Amino acid sequence: MSIPNRKRSHVDLAIGGDVAFRSKSTGLERYSFQYNALPEIDLADVDTSTSFVGRPLQLPLIITGMTGGYPEAERINTELAEACATLGIAMGVGSMRAALEDPALAASFACVRPFADAVPIIANFGAVQATRWRSAGRLDEMMQRAVEMTGAAALTVHLNPLQELAQPEGEPEFRGVLETIHQMVGTCPVPLVVKEVGAGLSASVVQRLREVGVEIIDIAGAGGTSWAGVEILRHNSPSDVEHLWDVGIPTAECIIVNRDLVPTMIASGGISSGTDVAVCIGLGANLVGAARPVLQAQHHGGVGGVVDFITSWRTALRQWMFLTGSPTIDELRKAPLILVS
Ligand SMILES: Cc1cc2nc3c(=O)[nH]c(=O)nc-3n(C[C@H](O)[C@H](O)[C@H](O)COP(=O)(O)O)c2cc1C
């Protein structure tokens, strides 16, 4: 399948398919904030603002990279960017590989550029492809072009060995990836983010990323969208890969094991409410990311659908900040959580 058709089928399955983890949850539901009957703040005192790569955000939220590279994706990315500008949150685009290799596919990424002053945009490509470009001596050029095409304030390189393994057209070729990331840390024109795509990053992986200088890490844990699941549904011989559906480290566990290792931790993977956002921060994340539920909100309600959806998360986040006596996001990170199951 061509890359544009693959991107289209990913979006269609994420919107309409049953692609959640089957027997594994994020683990976030096991935690609850300790109720504080003396919060000593007014609800009106609560301030959800924070920053990402030196840019202000109204909420500690990022719509993580999803799409681009086929014509209909232009509308999706434009509407997501418009919603992010209204909400004051950051936005990632999907893998830019196809558009970097074929400029005819650039429009569905370049459409976010007009929003780049209002929205910290995060460019994106895969670590396997980056390693190929490094071998070809083209990595610096590709990073530069990805940033220019989108007006990006940061660049994400994604690690997805599970997805590459399950994908019919996959390229499970990860030799040399850490050295590629090491090179990117030194030469990327904007801050570099390393993320998984929903199977999680262990402490030993994060330690190795830290050793080569990575400072911003999205743990993208298990419990939300199963990318193995998406690829199994696309596979000609699903029985060869069926057992991979639920592979991954739950989001809550990824946050806990990595919270003292990472200067800026983005927590994502299965975030489905404002309560989840608050719990991720209470467990130690700096920022929280979400993908598939936001795509579904855009599909059903356009810009307004996304704005309403995230505004409901904002309401719950503010309530948890009040109930824990946390006027700021930094204070919420220190609020005590209880293991309830
Ligand atoms: C339609 C779709 C396409 C995606 N494409 C990318 C991608 O190109 N690059 C990337 O880093 N992550 C990609 N992701 C993964 C998400 O950024 C996220 O890490 C993952 O879906 C888990 O988050 P969720 O449970 O909130 O969906 C994609 C997700 C969706 C739903």
Image (cartoon, helix red, strand yellow):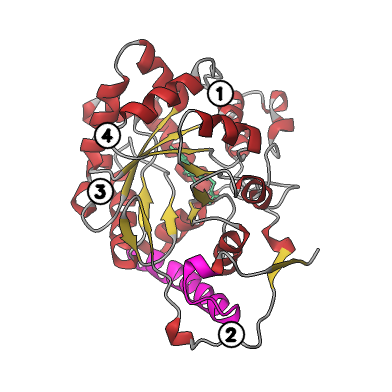
Q: Where is residue 285 in the image (x, y as percent from the top left)?
A: 54, 55
The residue at label 1 has a CB less than 8 Å from ligand 1: no
Mark 2 or mark 1, which is nearer the start of the sequence? 2
Query: Could you say which is closer to the camera, residue 108 or residue 186?
Result: 186
Dividing the picture into quadrants, the one containing residue 51 is: bottom left
The residue mark sitting in front, 4 or 1, is 4
At label 3, the amino acid type is Val
Q: Disc 4, disc 2: CB below 8 Å?
A: no
Q: Does the residue labelled 4 lie within 8 Å of ligand 1?
A: no
The numbered dot on residue 39 is 2
Question: Disc 3 or disc 1, which is closer to the eye?
Answer: 3
Residue placed under numbered mark 1 in the picture: 168
Dot label at residue 189: 4
Residue 294 in view (yes/no) = yes
In the rendering, at what x and y percent does residue 108 appear? 27, 41
Comes first in the chain, label 4 or label 1: 1
Q: What stretch is highlighted in magenta?
A: 303-331
Secondary structure under badge 2?
A: loop
> Which of pointers 4 and 3 lies earlier in the amino acid sequence?
3
105 to 72, vertically: above or below:
above
Q: Is residue 330 magenta?
A: yes
The answer to whether the residue labelled 2 contacts the one labelled 3, judged by CB atoms less than 8 Å apart, is no
Label 4: element kind = loop
Disc 4 or disc 3, which is closer to the eye? 4
- Residue on which disc 3 sits: 112
Kind of residue at disc 4 = Pro
